[in-house]
Image: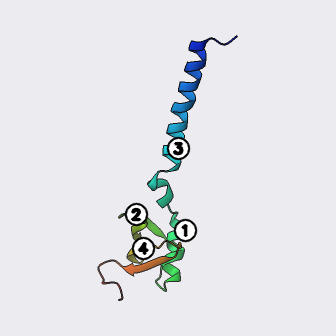
Amino acid sequence: MVTRLGQRKVESMAWFFGVILSSLLASPAAAADVSHGEMAAAIRSADYPCAHVLKIDSSGDDAWLVQCNSGSFKVSRDQDGRFKVTRAGTQPDK
């Protein structure tokens, strides 16, 4: 037989773990994570050379500064999941 106090503890723990799990799943950082391979492919598909990604720094929501073996690039992702790539230090095309 479960006591009232025991039932409340179980409910409190379930609520606590539910809050933790939902905050982890809704984390913007998790949604913005991309792999080195995905970044290299995005850079190459924009007709820039990139054989190896050395470093990825987030620069905002769905935007990154990517250091590749061939140089630095600004990479962003639109709402449809398409990547836009420009060389770092250059102005984007209008």
Could you give the CA–CA distance between mark 1 and mark 3, rounded to whole angstroms?
28 Å
On the rendered structure, is 15 left or right of 70?
Answer: right
Identify the element where label 3 is drawn.
Answer: helix
On the rendered structure, is 14 left or right of 63?
Answer: right
| Residue 22 circle label | 3
What residue is drawn where x is 38% and y is 62%?
A: 57
**Residue 51 shows in the view:** no
Kindly indicate whether the residue at mark 2 contacts the one at mark 1 (C-beta within 8 angstroms): no
- Circle nearer the N terminus (1, 4): 1
Q: Estimate the x, y position of residue 43 in percent, counting from the top left.
A: 48, 78
Q: Estimate the x, y position of residue 20 in percent, counting from the top left.
A: 50, 38
Q: Estimate the x, y position of residue 51 in percent, counting from the top left.
A: 51, 75
Q: Disc 1 marks which residue?
A: 37
What residue is drawn where x is 42% and y is 64%?
A: 56
Instruction: Say few, some or many: other residues with alpha carbon within 10 Å of mark 3 (under 14 / 14 to 19 / 20 or more).
Output: few
Mark 4 or 2, closer to the camera: 2
Q: Amino acid at mark 2?
A: Asp
Q: Disc 4 marks which residue?
A: 75
Q: Disc 2 marks which residue?
A: 61
Mark 3 or 2, closer to the camera: 3
Identify the element where label 4 is drawn.
Answer: strand
Q: Estimate the x, y position of residue 7 in percent, counting from the top left.
A: 60, 18
38 in relation to 6, above or below: below
- Taking the view exactly as shown, the residue that stands out farthest to the bottom is 94
- Circle nearer the N terminus (4, 2): 2
